Amino acid sequence: MPRLHSLFLLPLLTLSLVSPLVGADEAAATSAVKTAVAEIPEALHAESRQRVKIDGKTIDLKATAGQLLMKNDQGEPIALFGYTAYEKEGADRRTRPVLFAYNGGPGSASMWLHMGILGPQRTVVKDGDFATKGPFRRVNNEYSILDRADVVMIDPVGTGFSVAVGEAKGEDFWGVDQDIESVSDFIARWTTDNGRWQSPKYLLGESYGGIRSGGVAYQLLQAHSIALNGVILVSPYMDFAAGNAGLAMDLPYVNYFSTYAATAWYHEAVDDRPDDLQTFLRQAEDFAANVYAPVLFKGASASAQERQQVLQGMERFTGISAEYWDRANLRVDEGRFAKELLRDRRQTTGRIDSRFVNDGLNHIGEQFTYDPFFPAVGPAFVATFNDYYREVLGVKSDRKYITSGGLFMRWDNTHAQPGQTQYDKVPFANTAVDLAYTMVQNPNMRLLVQQGYYDLATPYGATDHFLNHLPIPARLRDHITVEHYEAGHMMYIHPPSMEKFRGDLAAFIDAGQE
């Protein structure tokens, strides 16, 4: 009995002894929270009046650039989300469409789309050349879509000027689902703050922006009851398994093959090269689907004759020797291809745009050392954007605008896929499934896909694959428009493709207003 009594008193005694300390700790914690909140940087904000001339007509714009403070469900600050919004002066906000746009990476800022095709100013580069000699130029962007829709350029956390704040960390945003949720929350918040709930809404995502768009379209509908009028996928990366050569999976090699053929054709690396690219590509696509893929599927059970037939076709369509393809066991990723194709010329082709070419650095290496595309156009884009953003839009900050944060190396690729009941999350994302769920539940939503033939980052064969495997009713396939360009990943730096890009996007938005 005495023992029981002492045990009963111990918690009370302990409580009485520590209660003053608990109060002190709570006061200290409250003070720390107040200090942390006080230390959250003030959001960057700059408003200006801009204008753009398109088809001979001048459009006056209100430009808002800077950061939006985002909070969690408990009202705690978690991020300063960078963005730039262009809204037409005097337009009816209920009927004026608004286009939310972002690049990919993951870890790439929206600068490329902003200065390449969507904003009121665009960077001048000479297609195929190295734009590395200043002064760099930016000009009125007559190919912008701002005559048809307002545009909001978004920089997810870890890109541009977007940063985690308060108790949040960058890692809280760096993953498929984390990114989808934060970008969706930003769109909903911006919509509320700017009175745009009635506006027709569109998403435009480039590259990894495809995975983001598939998930965001579904998240907006499910979590915010925001139904989109349309989604635009530019050079989309949608399915990890279908779009990553170099892994122990056969499907990506088949999907990449037609872009290998296009690149070889462009650089005149194949014998008996036809004059017409499209004829050559149809032949390469047929070979990949009906000759190459079955042999990969058979593996060691494929006959010597079947294997030899594939090797001959691979040499015919790529210009790379059958002997090399044989040593590679019929499988070459894009880095090896870019290195091998013009090895005899001691040159390397681009990955982002395989039309680009420059001197190689290691002539016996197996992988290309660098992608000629980025040093060719990157300096001009970075210089003109920083000049425009800081000096014209008026965003004053001594911080570096992060164009590429390399977040893909730290990215959580798992995904809570709709309809998946066996696992909480699948190990690698395929948000084409999310996109299909959205299209079924929002049967008025339309899809535009814009894809370059010379894109070794997200090859058009992988894009065709995800589109052909969208689990949607046949009637909804009429809502899908696919446009191809004789350019690469950023097809809008190629003048003919730039004009076509604008025309295709304008027609898509116009059709949505009917």
Image (cartoon, helix red, strand yellow):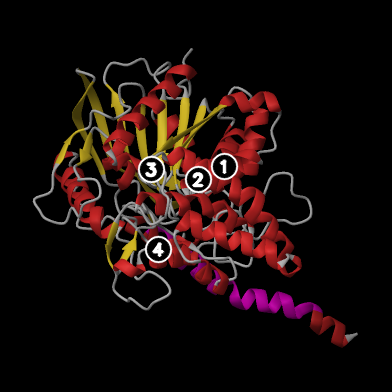
Q: Earlier in the sequence, mark 2 or mark 3?
A: 3
Q: Which of marks 3 and 1 is nearer the N terminus?
A: 3
Q: Which mark is residue 464?
A: 1
Q: Name the residue under label 3.
A: 154
Q: Most extreme residue toward the left, as rendered?
A: 135
Q: Name the residue under label 2.
A: 460
Q: What element carries label 3?
A: strand
Q: Residue 89, can we see it?
A: yes
Distance from Cα at disc 2 to Cα at disc 1 = 6 Å
Q: Name the residue under label 4.
A: 341
Q: Is residue 44 left or right of residue 419?
A: left
Residue 12 in magenta?
A: yes
Residue 404 in magenta?
A: no
- Which quadrant would residue 22 be assigned to in this image? bottom right
Magenta extent: 8-34
Q: Earlier in the sequence, mark 4 or mark 1?
A: 4
Quadrant that contains the N terminus: bottom right
